[in-house]
Amino acid sequence: MSVDLSALGLPESLDEVDAAGLGEVVVRARRAGALMEWHRLRAMAEVFERLVAPYVGEDRRVYDAHTRAANEIAMMLGRSQAGVETELMDAAHLFAGLPQVAHCLHDGVITGGHIRTIIARTALVGGQDYAPLVDTELAEALRRQGSWSLQRLRDVCDRIVFRHDPAAVRERRKASEEGRRVWAENATDGMAVLHASMTAENVRVAAARVDALANSVCESDPRRDGARRSDAVFALLSGELFECQCDRGDDCDATVPAPAMVQAAEAQVIIHVITEAATLDEPEPEPDAAEAAAVEADSEAAASAATVPTATEVDDAEPTLVEGSDAGSVLEDPEPAEPVAAEPDSAEDPRPAPKKPTTRHVYSPRHSGVGFMDGYGVISGDYVRELTQRAGAVIRPVNPNGKPLRPHLPSDPYRPSTAMNLFIRIRDGYCTVPGCDKPAFAGDLDHVHEYDHDNPAAGGQTRACQMVCVR
């Protein structure tokens, strides 16, 4: 079957395309691939709607409608049935729950890989009354100028979902923490892989201990970094001696501690966590069913006089910073949610206005807040509060007086001040080079435009708009 590439804006042959035009062909091909993926998922969603959805509530057979539809498609594609069953559910979730996000795929704003991450991170949204709001906010974020790595995409999805349903996020985190485990699996050539799941901050602490031991060898050790870290993990777990493997004998200047003697001072780790100060306060408990029903009835009776607090009102809290060994820093939320404005009633339309999804609980005192852990991503407000209870945690406001801060050192206008350095890392979160997810607190800062040392006023001044995080 021949394909008319010109309809997709692609040349039939690359022979007549010059070197400068090849990049444009790559961009157009990426957009065409996104469009094809949209059509594929749209067809999958249609299969679900026609062959599966009508029987979801009544088909109790083992070989039910969902299984039959997936089996037929799997046979045509030469794929596993289980994989197609998952894709049917994902496609239905995308087009029924996130139609505006699906349109971003149609327009080439994102790719199929992005869609899989979005579907996975918005699993809590399906069937909820706030789903249209999540869809709108996420689509608006995706269409902003910039690149989307999978890490950044996960962060924006989590930030939006966390704000809309903190209770569901709390339950999901509880289940994840209770499911932590250690497991091993065989690899090839006599090797095996050891896995361990634990909280993000504990991983940072454990990794720092491993690095401290692995880096204690001399420069002549022949092992690669990964091999040394693997040997250090085994030494820490087994208690066996970890040694430098150089051939220098008595001339080796390595000071290798015993595994049990790798102290916190040698493996110090500072975890930075960004949030707003209001997140540090415990939220009001969720009401029980009877109380919630009573509140809902009162709200409907007084709808004309009721007011809903907006995100702006909640986000006026003072930002704070937490620093400490094995704990972190808490700073302002890098991207606060925007208030949701209600559409005005139309006097010309006699039909009753459709019930709009509500997110009153999102911006109420029960909203538990969100945070951003450097090197990990968005975390829930409950997680932030857990970190502040760890030994060594220090809470520090970023700008307690709310006054303008000096952008550069008084003695050297090229060097950013401590306050500017901290602000840029908070703002960027990651390295700003497209595709690089190196944490901002682990990278360097640089000027967007080269600093003119002879005449600083001519360009490249040390200001927030001229500074970015780079790897």
Image (cartoon, rainbow, N blue to C red):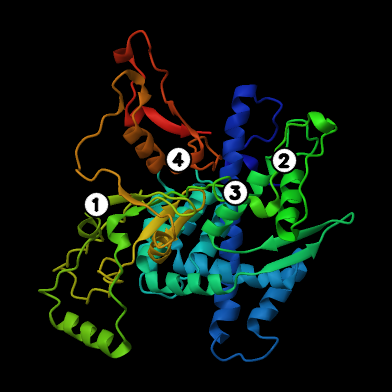
Gap between marks 2 and 3, in whole Å? 14 Å
**Considering only order in the chain, which callout, 1 or 2, is on the residue closer to the N terminus?**
2
Q: Is residue 221 left or right of residue 459?
A: right
Residue that numbered label 2 is attached to: 225
Q: Position of residue 204 (x, y in %)?
A: 56, 53
Q: Secondary structure at mark 3?
A: helix
For the question of whether residue 78 can be seen, the reply is no
For residue 208, which numbered disc appears in the image?
A: 3
- The type of residue carrying mark 3 is Ala
- Of tags 1 and 4, which is closer to the observer? 1
Q: For residue 408, what is the image quadrant?
A: top left
Gap between marks 1 and 4, in whole Å? 29 Å
Q: Position of residue 309 (x, y in %)?
A: 20, 65
For residue 318, which numbered disc appears in the image?
A: 1
Residue that numbered label 4 is attached to: 146
Q: Secondary structure at mark 4?
A: loop
Gap between marks 4 and 2, in whole Å? 33 Å
> Going 35% across and 38% down the picture, which residue do you hit?
423
> Going 64% across and 41% down the picture, which residue do you hit?
5
- Of tags 2 and 3, which is closer to the observer? 3
Q: Secondary structure at mark 2?
A: helix
Crowding at mark 1 (Cα within 10 Å: few <14, some 14-19, many 20+): some
Q: Is residue 466 left or right of residue 118?
A: left
